[in-house]
């Protein structure tokens, strides 16, 4: 029980300080001290390193988000045809309750936004973002399978990764909203964010973009030969 309480206090302290100062702006020692832990190495004992505590922050909020997203995906899978608008809602709506104060939800959104902003295209299983991109019960893989056949031609995979682009945009907007403080209502924010995520997902490649991509592929093929 003592270990459980200590872990929970460390996670709450980390999400608070990371949200306030940035992920690299708070030292592990400060997080430990802010959590009321006398042992200066308590965080390392429980989580190992900075990535470990970041994974713990995401894991704290993940089950609630997963449950909501699966429920929405159940509704979507129960009918045909499916649309990118409703799938965009299935990505956005499960995160909306995290904007409300209490249990570190806004801090979590700010931390994830920073992680998404700095993300590269190679995210392995040890990366804190891996859980965001998959979900502990695979809601994101399920979401991705439903979205994929609806995406415009040429937007899947290199160099665009359209699903990830939409996800990154959504999280940056959530981080901005969370940082600005609680609002009387998030209904308009939610509706507009769903519209914008859907617009990103369904935007076709323009003629100039297609020409540039085709040229890039021809150059790559020439070099391989």
Image (cartoon, rainbow, N blue to C red):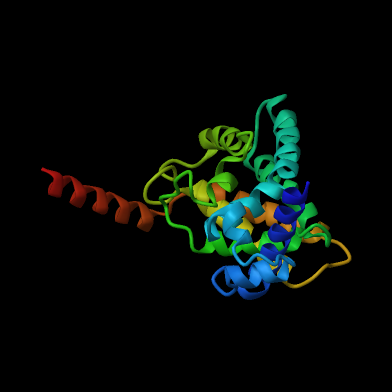
Q: How many marks?
A: 0
Residue most extreme to the right: 184
Q: Is residue 93 left or right of residue 172?
A: right
Residue most extreme to the left: 225
Q: Which of 123 and 43 is in front in this view?
A: 43
Q: Which of 215 and 114 is in front in this view?
A: 114
Residue most extreme to the front: 39
Residue 54 showing in the rendered view? no
Rendered location of residue 171, percent (x, y): 62, 58
Q: Where 224 sits versus 26, above or below?
A: above
Q: In this view, does 81 lie to the left or right of 200?
A: right
Q: Is residue 160 left or right of residue 196?
A: left
Residue 111 showing in the rendered view? yes
Rendered location of residue 82, percent (x, y): 65, 32
What quarter of the picture does the C terminus occupy?
Answer: top left
Q: Where 101 sits versus 218, above or below?
A: below
Q: Which of 114 and 8 is in front in this view?
A: 8
Res. 43 image quadrant: bottom right
Which residue lies at the image location 64% right of the left edge and 37% below the top edge? 83
Which residue lies at the image location 60% right of the left edge and 73% below the top edge? 26
Rendered location of residue 85, percent (x, y): 67, 44
Q: Where 163 sits versus 98, above or below?
A: above
Rendered location of residue 80, percent (x, y): 67, 26
Q: Which of 26 and 185 is in front in this view?
A: 26
Which residue lies at the image location 61% right of the left edge and 37% below the top edge? 143
Which residue lies at the image location 75% right of the left edge and 30% below the top edge? 75
């Amino acid at each position: 029980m003592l270990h459980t309480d200590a872990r929970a206090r460390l996670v709450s302290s980390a999400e608070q300080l990371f949200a306030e100062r940035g992920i690299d702006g708070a030292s592990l020692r400060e997080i430990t001290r802010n959590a009321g832990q006398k042992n200066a190495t308590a965080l390392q004992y429980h989580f190992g390193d900075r990535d470990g505590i970041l994974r713990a922050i995401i894991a704290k909020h993940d089950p609630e988000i997963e449950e909501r997203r699966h429920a929405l995906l159940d509704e979507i899978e129960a009918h045909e045809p499916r649309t990118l608008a409703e799938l965009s809602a299935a990505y956005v709506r499960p995160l909306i309750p995290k904007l409300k104060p209490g249990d570190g939800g806004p801090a979590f959104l700010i931390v994830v936004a920073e992680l998404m902003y700095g993300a590269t295209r190679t995210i392995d299983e040890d990366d804190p973002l891996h859980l965001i991109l998959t979900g502990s019960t695979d809601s994101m893989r399920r979401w991705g399978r439903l979205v994929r056949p609806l995406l415009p031609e040429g937007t899947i995979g290199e160099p665009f990764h359209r699903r990830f682009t939409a996800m990154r945009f959504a999280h940056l907007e959530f981080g901005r909203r969370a940082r600005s403080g609680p609002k009387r209502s998030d209904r308009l924010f939610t509706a507009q964010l769903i519209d914008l995520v859907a617009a990103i997902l369904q935007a076709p490649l323009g003629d100039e973009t297609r020409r540039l991509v085709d040229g890039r592929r021809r150059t790559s093929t020439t070099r391989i030969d």
